[in-house]
Image (spheres, rainbow, N blue to C red):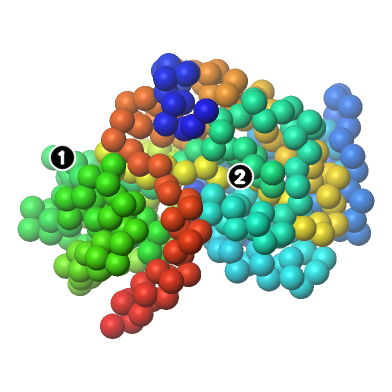
Amino acid sequence: MKLTHIALMVGSLALAACGGGGSSNTAATSGSEPAPAASSGSRDLTVASWGGIYQDAQREIYFKPFSELSGKPLLDESYDGGYGVLQAKVQAGNPNWDVVQVEAEDLERGCTDGLFEKLDWDKIGGRDKFFDDAVSDCGVGSIVWSTALAYDANKLQDGPKSWADFWDVNKFPGKRSLRKGPKYTLEFALLADGVSKDELYNVLSTPEGVDRAFKKLDELKPHLIWWEAGAQPLQFLASGEVAMASAYNGRITGINRTEGKNFKVVWPGSIYAVDSWVILKGAANKEAAMDFVAFSSQAEHQVKLPQYVAYGLPNKQAAQDVPADLAAELPTTAANMTDAISLNVDFWVDNSEELTQRFNAWLAK
């Protein structure tokens, strides 16, 4: 079942959050359930994710409980993504991470290139327990998340409704912030230039479409502040440094909950994707890593995530069990998916390197 059919299946479902972090060593205590396999390596089981409030949530619902159950410490670290990071760790041998959360195109490339271990789907509970887009030989979906337009409703009572509004600096004066890279940025530029969501990747797949996207970016370039970590666009909004920004939906909801902000998500034109857990090839703690992936993929654990951060859940049962009051903030809710766009993973696997080079050259002009 594709993500575009989630809303039809689950009805009203009762978040690349990336950014800051560091590391945390989760202490172990005794558990009442049968313990998973202990770490077999010379170091503690290590999990890398996206940092920030999302990783804080993971620590409470996955890392600490698993550590207690296994009777072993679990070290968690954060990173800002990037295929090169994963490639370097595996190619150097004896990677210092075991489990990593990765974006969809990195999953596909890494599985093809042999960077990840094949998963034991019997241990996870079977592929049919998850939406199709969350199932791979090398990965299992951890969240469904969106990159969307965000603004501060306390400063803009009649805020933007589309990416065309994002580009309209006369109607909405002020700086803008976009993620520093071609992915999402080129899509948003074409949407702002009037390309429909259904034709988006058809247009972007042509040289003329790429030229059109960069030409549209030229218009906004003097008004742009680029972000690289997921916390940054919300910081820019909070300080008033920008009038609007692209941001991860879970970050937007999270700062509203924790800091009482009134940041709004503009769902039409948002782009959603699945992040997945993978195990790095040659991981010292392969068995314990597989146990962790299985543990964190169980519906009873995954369903707790929207209490902390508003990301959709790839486990079908977990998605069905989300309380209605939390469902409205999830990207997988029917109303929020109506005019949203599924990230075209194949396009970015095929074109990421070339478009990143062009984007960097354009940025340096």
> In the rendered view, does 65 fall on the left or right side of 346?
right
* Figure check: 348 above or below 87: above
Q: Residues within 10 Å of mark 2 (few under 14, many from 20)?
A: many
Residue indicated by mark 1: 157
Residue indicated by mark 2: 276
* Image location of residue 143, percent across then percent down: 55, 38
**Residue at the bottom extreme of this rendering:** 365
Front in this rendered view, residue 21 or 286: 286
User: Which numbered dot is residue 231?
Assistant: none
Q: Quadrant of the C terminus?
A: bottom left
Q: Quadrant of residue 226?
A: bottom left
Residue type beneath disc 1: Gln
* Image location of residue 246, percent across then percent down: 33, 52
Residue type beneath disc 2: Ser
Q: Quadrant of residue 132?
A: top right
SS of the residue at dot 1? Answer: loop
Front in this rendered view, residue 129 or 158: 129
* Image location of residue 285, percent across then percent down: 85, 52
Q: Is residue 241 visible?
A: no
Q: Residues within 10 Å of mark 1 (few under 14, many from 20)?
A: few
* Figure check: 108 above or below 222: above
SS of the residue at dot 2? Answer: strand
Tell me what residue is drawn at x 35 percent, y 80 percent: 361
* Image location of residue 319, percent across then percent down: 53, 24
